[in-house]
Image (cartoon, rainbow, N blue to C red):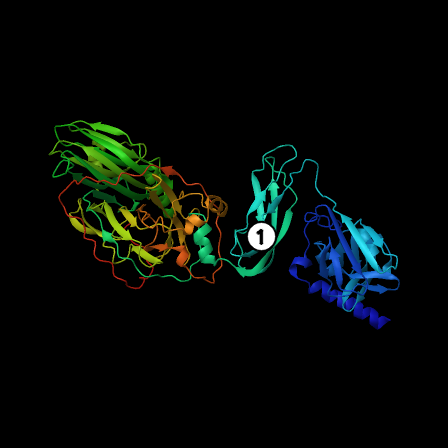
Amino acid sequence: MVKQGLVRRLTLFLLCFLAPPSLAQGPTTNPFVFNTSRLMGTVQLAFTLEQTTAYLNGETFNFSSLPKLVGGRAMVPLREFADALNLDLFITAESVRLGKLEVKKDFSAVLIGGQPTDLLSAQLLEGQIYVSIRTLSDALEGVLGVSSDGRTLTLTLLSQREGTVGQPQARFSTNKTTYAQGEPVLLSDYSYDPDGLDLPSRKWTGKQATYFIAGEQTLTLQVSNQKGISSLPYSRKIIISSERVDSPLSYALKYASLGGSFPDSSLPYPRLDPLPGSPDFTPLLFSDSPENVPTQGLLYQDIVYPGVNTATPGTGRVRVVAHHVNGTSGNARVFVVARNPDAQPLSIRSSRLGETAPARFAGTLGQATLLDYFADTDGSTLQVGAGQTVTLYSTPILAPGTGMNLMMDLEIAAPSLGRVELSVLMLSDPLLPIPAVIQQIPTLPPDGRHVRGTFMGAVRRLNVDLSGPLPAKVVLGDASDSPLQGMDALSRTPVVLRGNFGMLYELNLQNAGGVVGALAARGGLYKGAIAVTDPQLSRTDVLPLPLSGVIADPNAPVLFLRANGLPNAGSSAQNTLKTGLQKVLSTQDARGMNFQLQFVPASGSNLPIHLIFYRPANLPFAPAQPQPQPSSPLPTVPPANPSNKPLEPTAPAPVPPVVPPEDPPSHQLEGR
């Protein structure tokens, strides 16, 4: 007897300490109350002694260990019983608990609600714990029925709801209980608050847009009302079959939200050869050196001639880009100032302006500025009299160590021989850029690492024909994408704008029907934006890339285009199904559609980037795991006017044919 007792104690001890982690540590709720969040309504278990077949709510399932009759007690394996009824089994170093039942590890006591009960109602049989079904019925406050021959037993449980009065109630359903791999899982959330309060917070566990591993999945929802009171968790189970209807890649291209990333282990793809569009002569004044400004002073200055040799005499455009950090010991501000050195007046209109200030992270500066720039179309006009100086832009106060980023398009109307002087300067607060101050501040030298200068060709237009085999890519920012050549007007030295930061790429996508576009960051971290114009819908969507965080994985492109004739925003699985999945893949009536992209390399990010174009109907399955992203509404702005009037007769930098070298090594480009 002593030896048998030691064996029983040792076996149970090993069961306790070798249990899976999910069972070895229970939640912090009352361990004597079983988890009823997954048991809504009545649950009924029927079984026959010495038979493996049992019935749960009328559905057949099988015990792997036989229910037994031991000493006149009908006994069932405890772990299998708990799993079948979806109950939480708590295993600790001292005991095993299920609902109000507690079995001490050495079988020295069997308790219901803390009170001792029949010591032999829990026994170690064939290496596992068996418990009397009557004891379980009492511990779970169930109703036990026995057949006339005493061999078939039916246990009925009514779920015992935990919670407090007025607690929110989490509820949801799925449109099916069994899904194929790659099939969208559609949810209906009908959670509510008994007092009618809003439910601003939802916490999901196990929720995915789809699944690619066969087996059972548990989805759990917990909601909180506006007072911060949370519901109990509410769960449902679904089954993922071995059938596959989509690969992770093809699923993402059909359903993933724009701005979300997806894995693509097939990168890189063949290169496309864009053809140059109409040339552009718009000057770009670029001020990024010194980037970390050590003292107040003039950062960059040049004179432009908007009325010379232009298609419309007396009018022209110019872009000003500035990126600086306050490296002084006190507060400061950055200004953009225009001076009319001639005897006749002129006017300056800000047609587009994007700015971020103050901020401490370069990636944040770049993306926020681009989103601001793409969304801004309504500018103000200033009249500049003869010899007058006006301030076009001013940052908020920049504390030491904080930076600014600016991208501003100006339209200037002047006499045919008129000039305008544009200056970027940093002044200690509270100084203002009046002529007397500007004349006294020093001209700061470049820092030797970053770029400043004037470059011709602020817009590069490319035509991309997508009628050929896809997937394929367009590469921007590598050695084959010719950098702008320019001049530092202050030092009169030639400069090169590597990476073309501040230059606007206008890509005309031809034969784009049914195409999906994504951006892959192949040079390092990237955080930017893109504007997508759908002429068929006469709308432009401005999209952050990515929606949040940064693009860090070079093999996880971020979706920016789904060219299916539908709105380019809100492309969740639910919305896609509502509008008709067939439209995503139906390209025969939309193959000739054109789309326009506007892209500016983001300050503080790395190049090159790949614009990858897919046609989902042509994709094979790919063995990658999806990473579904939440959908996000996109700001909508009118299509930008792509016309740029020439300001000077200088030819733009040539766009050479694209050759297919391998991806260059990752690098941080200096022209930011």
Q: Quadrant of residue 364?
A: top left
Q: Looking at this view, name the residue that lies furthest to the front.
A: 589
Residue at horizontal 83 percent and vertical 69 percent from the top: 5
Q: Is residue 123 above or below residue 112?
A: below
Q: In the picture, which quadrant includes the N terminus?
A: bottom right
Q: Position of residue 34 (x, y in %)?
A: 73, 50
Residue matched to label 1? 206
Q: Position of residue 127 (x, y in %)?
A: 76, 68
Closer to us: 656 or 340: 656
Residue 344 vs residue 451: left or right?
left
Residue 383 vs residue 594: left or right?
left
Closer to us: 354 or 196: 196
Q: Quadrant of residue 440?
A: top left
* Residue 433 visible in the current orientation: no
Q: Position of residue 672 (x, y in %)?
A: 30, 49
Closer to us: 612 or 175: 175
* Residue 26 visible in the current orientation: yes
Q: Secondary structure at mark 1?
A: loop
Q: Looking at this view, name the residue that lies furthest to the bottom.
A: 3
The amino acid type, in three-letter code, at marker 1 is Gly
Answer few, some or many: residues within 10 Å of disc 1's Cα (few below 14, many 20 plus, some between 14 and 19): few
